[in-house]
């Protein structure tokens, strides 16, 4: 998962969504781990095709700028099966993940799935970790969570950081 010549491993952690995908680039080498970049991918355009194209273009720009060794996506959890989740929400998430996975394949970068429950069990010792647990973990790791434009910590980016930290601590099966 790294480059043998430099010893650098660059992990792109992604908390996928249709409306607001959080991402972070963690650079790791013998000197430690640093948060090299982070941001949000949000669709632009009027219709679903234009919005998916926008997500693909933004994700591909992140891939090109960051040159990651691997990309780790949070795999959606049990919320998808709850009674209140609309079919359209699940389909939109699947479509946005698909265009990002295509971007990984086009760039020749390995993509991995990280089950949200496994990540939380490994990182926090329990699957039901709260948003406060996520923020505290990110801060303990020495990273500052960006603030959303309307105020408050950006949990989409915080979740992406946790996925990236998990990726650095554990390898997970490649998405088939």
Image (tube, helix red, strand yellow):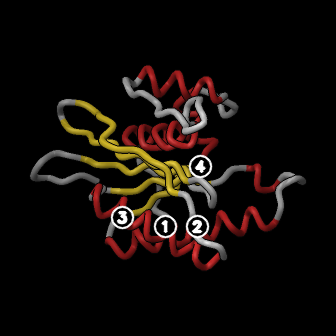
Marks 4 and 1 close (CB-CB < 8 Å):
no
Circle 4 — which element? strand
N-terminal of the two: label 4 or label 1?
1
In this view, the mark in front (2 or 3): 3
Residue 121 vertical position relative to residue 15 in the rendered view, above or below: above
- The Cα–Cα distance between marks 1 and 3, rounded to whole angstroms, is 11 Å
x, y percentage for residue 84? Answer: 88, 53
Q: Nearer the viewer, mark 2 or mark 4?
A: 2
Q: Position of residue 2 (x, y in %)?
A: 24, 52
Give me the residue at 37% from left, 41% from top.
Answer: 168
| Alpha-carbon span between mark 2 and mark 3 | 15 Å
The answer to whether the residues at label 2 and label 1 have Cβ atoms under 8 Å apart is yes
Q: Which residue is mark 2?
A: 96
Q: Residue furthest left?
A: 5
Tell me the residue at 61%/79% (across/down): 49
Distance (Cα) linking label 2 and label 4? 17 Å
Query: Which residue carries the number 4 mark?
Result: 115
């Amino acid at each position: 998962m790294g480059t043998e010549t430099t010893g650098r491993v660059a992990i792109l952690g992604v908390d996928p969504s249709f409306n607001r995908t959080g991402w972070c680039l963690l650079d790791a080498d013998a000197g430690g781990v640093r948060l090299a970049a982070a941001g949000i991918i949000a669709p632009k355009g009027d219709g679903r095709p234009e919005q998916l194209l926008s997500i693909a273009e933004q994700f591909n720009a992140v891939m090109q700028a960051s040159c990651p060794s691997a990309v780790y996506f949070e795999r959606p959890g049990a919320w998808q099966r709850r009674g209140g989740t609309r079919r359209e929400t699940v389909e939109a998430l699947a479509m946005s993940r698909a265009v990002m996975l295509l971007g990984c394949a086009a760039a020749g970068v390995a993509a991995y799935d990280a089950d949200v429950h496994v990540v939380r069990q490994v990182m926090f010792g329990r699957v039901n970790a709260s948003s406060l647990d996520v923020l505290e973990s990110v801060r303990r790791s020495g990273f500052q969570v960006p603030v959303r434009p309307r105020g408050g910590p950006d949990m989409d980016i915080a979740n992406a950081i946790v996925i990236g930290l998990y990726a650095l601590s554990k390898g997970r099966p490649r998405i088939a």
